[in-house]
Amino acid sequence: MFRPHPHDIPRDTPYGRVVQLAYHAPDIARMADKAAAELGAGPFYLLSHIPLARCRYRGRDAAFDHSSAYGQWGGLMIELIHQHDDEPSAVRDMFAASEHGLHHAAIFVTDLDAAVARTTGDGLACALDATTDDGTRFVMMDGRADYGMFLEFYEPTADMRRFYGFVARKAAGWDGARVLRPIDL
């Protein structure tokens, strides 16, 4: 069976380079197994209940209780995201708890505020603006009307590049064992 390889996917956008595709996963373990078996993606590294120092959903303070698993598929990182509740969020804007599918493309940007301003000027609304406990800020712009998904922006900080490099290195030569692995950052 022919499987398109991510190196064949054009990844440059007017906003920056797509570095990740993220899928909503009602069951991260099951979806990781499927991605490994059918696409050769993996292994996946799981961060459970990712702590956020700050979270705003559509301009209001919010909670966003989610877990994500990160794996590699050729030149692209794959994120499997699961929200643990039904609180309003950029995830619930698109998927009910039991649904799965492509949620967003993540893009490295050199200036996060400038990228948000540009996409806002292009008619996209800011759905989520959050900062992790370790200080990594990420923003999800609602691009469903134009792109059928959200766009996630973050700056390629040294920590972010190290994490992307870690996932890519673990995928190189991976033997398919232990598809889903816990990780502590």
Image (tube, rainbow, N blue to C red):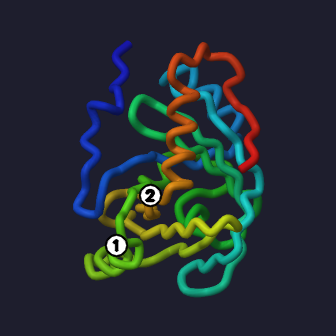
Q: In the visual, does 67 lie left or right of 151?
A: right
Tell me: residue 67, above or below residue 63: above
Q: Quadrant of the N terminus?
A: top left
- N-term-proximal mark, 1 vs 2: 1
Q: Which residue is painted at 50% across and 74% down in the image?
A: 127
Residue 93: x and y, percent? 55, 67
Q: Which residue is painted at 73% across and 41% down in the image?
A: 183
Residue 143: x and y, percent? 37, 66
Mark 1 or 2: the one toward you: 2
Q: In the visual, does 153 lie left or right of 54?
A: left
Q: Which residue is painted at 66% across and 84% down in the image?
A: 61
Q: Amino acid at mark 2?
A: Pro
Q: Residues within 10 Å of mark 2 (few under 14, many from 20)?
A: some
The residue tagged with tag 2: helix, strand or loop? Answer: loop
Tell me: residue 56, above or below residue 167: below
Q: Quick one: which residue is furthest to the bottom in this view?
A: 60
Which residue in the protein does label 2 denote? 156
Q: Amino acid at mark 1?
A: Ala
In front: 114, or 129? 114
Which residue in the protein does label 1 denote? 115
In which quarter of the view is residue 42 placed? top right
Residue 84: x and y, percent? 76, 57
Q: Which residue is painted at 68% across and 17% down in the image?
A: 177
Residue 44: x and y, percent? 63, 34
What separation in Å lies between label 1 and label 2 (alpha carbons)?
A: 13 Å
